Amino acid sequence: MEINTVIILLGLIFLWLVFLSFFLIKTARHYRYLISKVKKGDLKVILEEILRRVDKQGKDLESLGERLTKEEKKALKSLQQVGFVRFNPFSDTGGDQSFCLSLLDGEDNGIVLSSLHSRGQTRVYGKAVAKAKGKEAPLSKEEEETIKKAKKGK
């Protein structure tokens, strides 16, 4: 063999050894890191500890998922949507002194309060709302408008 061929082969072998040494050092560091977390430097103990932790985290995650589902269901029953409209129902009064206020939960259930203001008196009415519709009595156009505004702000 020629001397140049031998030098090239030795160079390739050297590079291969450097490459293998790099990965051996990296693997040894990783192994030392793993055993530093456990008193007994046994790979079986380390793996059992990792599996125990993963199992515990899985159970914790499942428990958190169940709690989240319960909280989401409870949140649907809380006040989430508010609509407000001012209007003038009577021609003999000036300005928009009357109003409708809708207070709805996440399932579009709740109440609509209406205040009708005239020169001599102010009356307040309340109506139950189920699925964005009047439950016991039909809704006026202003009350329906407040519900639409509340749903837009959802």
Image: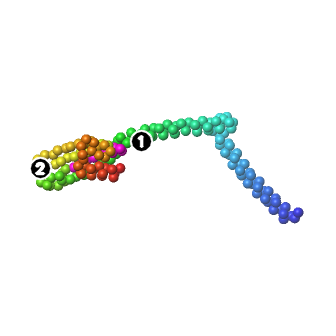
Magenta-drawn stretch contains 123? no
Q: Is residue 97 above or below residue 32?
A: below
Say what amino acid the circle numbered 1 marks: Glu
Front-most of residues 15 and 85: 85
Residue 63 image offset from top left, x and y in percent: 49, 37
User: Label 1 vs label 2: CA separation?
Assistant: 46 Å
Please name the residue shown 82% across and 59% down the image.
10
Query: Does the residue at mark 1 contact the one at mark 2 (Cβ under 8 Å)?
Result: no
Residue 43 image offset from top left, x and y in percent: 68, 38
Q: Is residue 84 visible?
A: no
Please name the residue shown 65% across and 38% down the image.
47
Q: Residues within 10 Å of mark 1 (few under 14, many from 20)?
A: few
Say what amino acid the circle numbered 2 marks: Arg
In the rendered structure, the answer to whether residue 71 lies left or right of residue 141 reads right
Q: Is residue 118 above or below residue 35?
A: below
Front-most of residues 49 and 18: 49
Residue 39 image offset from top left, x and y in percent: 65, 35
- Look at the image and tell me in which quarter the N terminus lies: bottom right
Front-most of residues 35 and 56: 56
SS for dot 2: loop
Mark 2 = which residue? 119
In the rendered structure, the answer to whether residue 91 lies left or right of residue 131 reads left
Residue 51, numbered circle: none
Which mark sits nearer the N-terminus, 1 or 2? 1
Q: Main secondary structure of the magenta part?
A: strand
SS for dot 1: helix
In the rendered structure, the answer to whether residue 35 lies left or right of residue 101 reads right
Mark 1 = which residue? 72
Q: Is residue 95 visible?
A: yes
Please name the residue shown 14% across and 55% down the image.
91
Which segment did they paint magenta? 99-108
Determine the image quadrant of residue 16: bottom right
